[in-house]
Image (tube, rainbow, N blue to C red):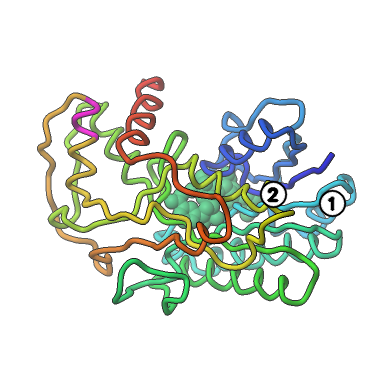
Amino acid sequence: METVLITGGAGFIGSHVTDALVENGQEIVVLDNLSTGSTENINSSSSVTFIEGDVRDEALVENIFRKNPDISGVIHLAAQSKVGPSLDDPLEDLMINVKGTVTVLEASRRHGVKTFVYASSAAVYGHVESLPISEEARVKPLSPYGASKLAAEQYVQTFGTLYDMNVSALRFANVYGPRQSADTEAGVITIFIEKLLSGHTPYIQGDGEQTRDFVYVDDVVNAVITPFLNSKEMKVNGVFNVSSQSQTPINQLLEVLCKEVGNTFNPDYGPIRPGDIKHSYLSHDKLTKVSNWRPQTPLNEGLKRTVQYYRSLY
Ligand SMILES: NC(=O)c1ccc[n+]([C@@H]2O[C@H](COP(=O)([O-])OP(=O)(O)OC[C@H]3O[C@@H](n4cnc5c(N)ncnc54)[C@H](O)[C@@H]3O)[C@@H](O)[C@H]2O)c1
């Protein structure tokens, strides 16, 4: 039986990826230092082994591969995943996102891993003139976070060129869904829902007409596991955007959420964040050409499920 190592498996996206692969009958090892993740998120199936530790810890990572010689695939999601902390402490961001990635990558190479999936980000692009953004667009990150995600992505691609390893770097748009923490960069949906459910007024930075590309977590999970499910007949190898490929104004997003929660739309508006991009959305045509992957969850449906989840916590 193949084993898949999932780093960051106690986090938002990683826990959903773990659930999906457990359902698919895979043996899973989760490595997570619980810095933002939680043990409550980790699937309790006996096919999941949880190891609490840091992806920068070379001895630990080596040990995991030695103890689990069946690991043939790695899904590397563990990261410092926020823009703010990367501005406050770029060195820490670099160490987690770049050193951590190269540590897992190098151990994967030593132990003959066949498939390596890396979670990259739309943050690698920065300001782009023409929309939707394709993988060929110029990359010019606007934060240390974007820079470290891009640097790690380059390492992943370099290893794919040098060694017999099927590598893919998936550049996620704004992922949303159950278990997302409100203090993440892309957590605007969770922030709005928590405000609405607790009777507070949501706050929009700018006029609310800025647009973003929101992709539901289940659709991201399906993209992440595509190289594992399709590795024989399809080559999901290289850099791919994972997105809804549609633009949603923040005002419209909040209106839908207000309806879902049963509140009237009456947000507070404030100044736009310096450096904020007005419009951003990613083309996913490259991924749909090489795989059967398509986003399946319309925004209204994804928001409905997300509100239901947060309601159940109140
Ligand atoms: N959520 C999004 O919208 C989004 C968008 C683009 C890219 N991404 C990328 O997707 C990945 C997952 O993001 P997420 O939203 O699930 O974030 P998350 O913070 O919920 O998950 C990250 C997980 O990694 C763990 N972790 C952090 N540093 C670690 C370390 N040094 N060693 C071991 N574990 C560590 C955390 O405890 C957490 O469980 C990240 O690589 C992030 O950069 C996310």
Q: Which residues are magenta?
A: 257-261
Q: As rendered, which of 235 and 44 lies closer to the eye?
A: 235
Specify whether 212 is left or right of 11.
left
Q: Residue at x 19, y 32 (%)?
A: 258
* Residue holding disc 1: 65
In this rendered view, identify the residue nearer to me: 213 or 13. Answer: 213
Q: CA distance from mark 1 to mark 2?
A: 19 Å
Q: Is residue 135 left or right of residue 118?
A: left
- Is residue 260 on the magenta stretch? yes
Q: Is residue 212 left or right of residue 51?
A: left
Q: Position of residue 288 (x, y in %)?
A: 50, 57
Q: Are marks 1 and 2 in contact (CB under 8 Å)?
A: no
Q: Position of residue 48 (x, y in %)?
A: 73, 33
> Residue at 42% across / 54% down in the picture?
243
> Which element type, helix, strand or loop, lies under badge 2?
helix
Q: Is residue 109 above or below residue 195?
A: below
Numbered disc in front, either 1 or 2: 2
The image quadrant where one finds the C terminus is: top left
Q: Secondary structure at mark 1?
A: helix
Q: Is residue 145 above or below residue 36?
A: below
The crowding category of the residue bearing disc 2, from other C-alpha atoms within 10 Å (few below 14, some 14 to 19, many at least 20), is many
Q: Is residue 81 visible?
A: no
- Which is nearer the N-term, disc 1 or disc 2? 1
Q: Is residue 194 in view?
A: yes
